[in-house]
Amino acid sequence: MIYTITLNPALDRTLWINEIREDVSNRIVREESYAGGKGIDVSKVLTALGIENRALGFIAGFAGRQLVAQLIRDGTSCDFIPVSGETRINIVIHEMNTGRQIILNSSGPKIKPFELLEITDVIKRIEDPEFFSIGGSLPPGAHPEIYRKIIETARLRGARVVLDVDREALRVGIGGKPDVIKPNIHELSSLVGRKLEKRGDILEAAREINRRGVEIVLVSMGPRGILLVSDGNVYQAVPPKVEVVNTIGAGDSSVAGFIYGQVSGKSLSESLILATAAGTATTLRVGTALAQKRDVEEIAHQVELETIEEE
Ligand SMILES: Nc1ncnc2c1ncn2[C@@H]1O[C@H](COP(=O)(O)OP(=O)(O)OP(=O)(O)O)[C@@H](O)[C@H]1O
Ligand SMILES: [Mg+2]
């Protein structure tokens, strides 16, 4: 079974209003709620690709219950640890007359240290886990060290681990030696502490991360696709040009596409093609909507793969 971990999930609430006016009561024309967070996005795309998986993490209060209900409605199973407080609600307001968008993000409940450690107990109890995908921001007050602990625990259980986090969480998390990381160029650049411009610079930076014990580094580069740097092989997969609607969740979809390939017995380069196609498939969808299987399959045929020989 594949597990995704989102320590600070969110209930994304989207409101549609004709025109936002000050000092009067604005009428909401339509409202929708979705389960959000980077690990949860991976779960949603895996489910869309027909891969059974389970979402783990922390939920709190009424918003947490609503988040679980949304996931179940969409066919993703989950096993969250309930904590006190309230799961964060992120609000997106669409002003229909102007097309303007207002986004309000909240930081989420504080999770007590003893509650945080429960996630490793949950991992220890899982029988025969295959993959863990860890993504997203830390809850307020949580130390990035928790990611290293989670990765070590998951690897001791014999599972492979993909880590998709940013900044300090990425730097500390790498200490747990995840099998795969998926930074974008900015994240990789801040990890190695220098600007990365040419492909050779990016490759060299990824090699540095290989040497720190991470077997596969997937550097995502937006419309330029993904560079895969592993011990033996280096590939770049470039997606076709598409009419991009919205790139929210593209990186998370790439993580799901890669795992989909790996658990379906595909080679490294085929998994990379699926990762690229899944990211691009998500850019075709409005708002927070993610990749559809049909699009992933169609785009995968159009992804160009280059094998890179190193000097
Ligand atoms: N403009 C685009 N055109 C085509 N494909 C795209 C575009 N943007 C993203 N993608 C696809 O999605 C993949 C992941 O996107 P990106 O590199 O932007 O990830 P990210 O920065 O981690 O995104 P996220 O905001 O979801 O964390 C890319 O490698 C590519 O395959
Ligand atoms: Mg990302």
Image (cartoon, rainbow, N blue to C red):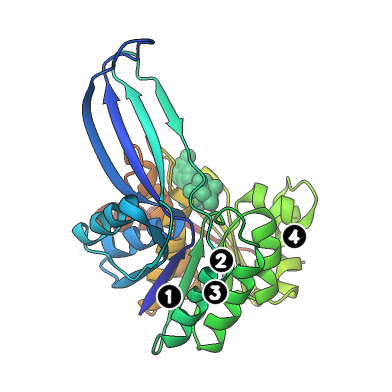
Residue 262 numbered mark, or none:
1
Residue 156 horizontal/vertical position (percent): 56, 88
Q: Are marks 2 and 3 in contact (CB under 8 Å)?
A: no
The quadrant where residue 103 appears: top left
Q: Position of residue 175 (x, y in %)?
A: 70, 73
Q: Nearer the viewer, mark 3 or mark 4?
A: 3
Which residue is labeled 4 in the image?
205
Closest to the camera, between mark 1 and mark 3, is 3
**Residue plotted at (34% across, 15% down):** 20
- Tell which circle, 1 or 3, labels the residue nearer the N-terminal end: 3
Going by the image, does 1 lie left or right of 177?
A: left
Please, what is the three-letter code of the amino acid marked with disc 4? Answer: Ala
Q: Which residue is mark 3?
A: 117
Residue wearing tag 2: 163
Helix, strand or loop at mark 2: strand
Estimate the spatial distance between the alpha carbons at disc 1 and disc 3, rounded to whole Å: 29 Å
Q: Is residue 76 left or right of residue 309?
A: left
Look at 36% across and 63% down and name the residue there.
43
Mark 3 residue type: Leu
- Report, in whole angstroms, how far the alpha carbon at label 2 lies from the one at label 3: 18 Å
Query: Label for residue 236?
Result: none
Q: Are marks 3 and 4 in contact (CB under 8 Å)?
A: no
Residue visible at 52% across and 81% down in the picture = 154
